[in-house]
Image: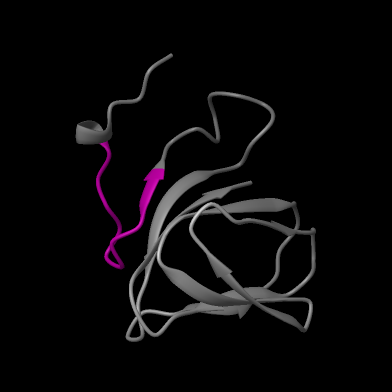
Amino acid sequence: MVIKHKNVTPRKDGTISFPIKDRQNILKHFAYKLVTPEKPFRPHSHDGDEIWYIISGKAVVDVGGEITEVEANDLIICPSNVSHGMTSDGEVYWLCIG
């Protein structure tokens, strides 16, 4: 299956979330996201692990109270039901897979 980027409608916050939930059994979502000072990814938790991959930029992530600076090509693992969020002083493009 191929899901063309041009056929995916961005959310109001600019997130592009590919519709995979009902098409496979491993992942719940695969999203391309942008964090800016005005649009932080606020801390939250939910059932299911996530993997974040930083495409470009620098950010600060909070995973379970552990604060870490990250940059392009870093991988972040967010365990199920553990609070996680991201802030940045600039623009950070990243993938959220979970």
Looking at the picture, how far across and down is residue 52, in whole percent?
A: 59, 54
Relative to 57, say whether 64 is above or below: below
Specify the principal SS of the magenta part: loop
- In the figure, residue 83 lies in which quadrant? bottom right
Front-lying residue, 50 or 61: 61
Magenta span contains residue 9? yes
Circle count: 0
Q: Residue at x 36, y 85 (%)?
A: 37
Q: Residue at x 23, y 32 (%)?
A: 7
In the displayed structure, does residue 41 sit left or right of residue 32?
A: right
Q: Residue at x 64, y 46 (%)?
A: 98
Relative to 76, say whether 8 is above or below: above
Looking at the picture, how far across and down is residue 16, in whole percent?
A: 34, 50
- In the figure, residue 19 lies in which quadrant? top left
Looking at the picture, how far across and down is residue 9, in whole percent?
A: 24, 45
- What scheme was used to colour the molecule? one colour
Magenta span contains residue 87? no
In the displayed structure, does residue 37 sit left or right of residue 79?
A: left
Q: Residue at x 58, y 69 (%)?
A: 70
> Which residue, as the protein is rendered here, is positioned at the far left?
6
Range shown magenta:
8-17
Looking at the picture, how far across and down is residue 57, in whole percent?
A: 40, 66
In the displayed structure, does residue 83 sit left or right of residue 16?
A: right
Relative to 59, say whether 9 is above or below: above
**Which quadrant does the N terminus fall into?**
top left
Relative to 63, say whether 3 is above or below: above
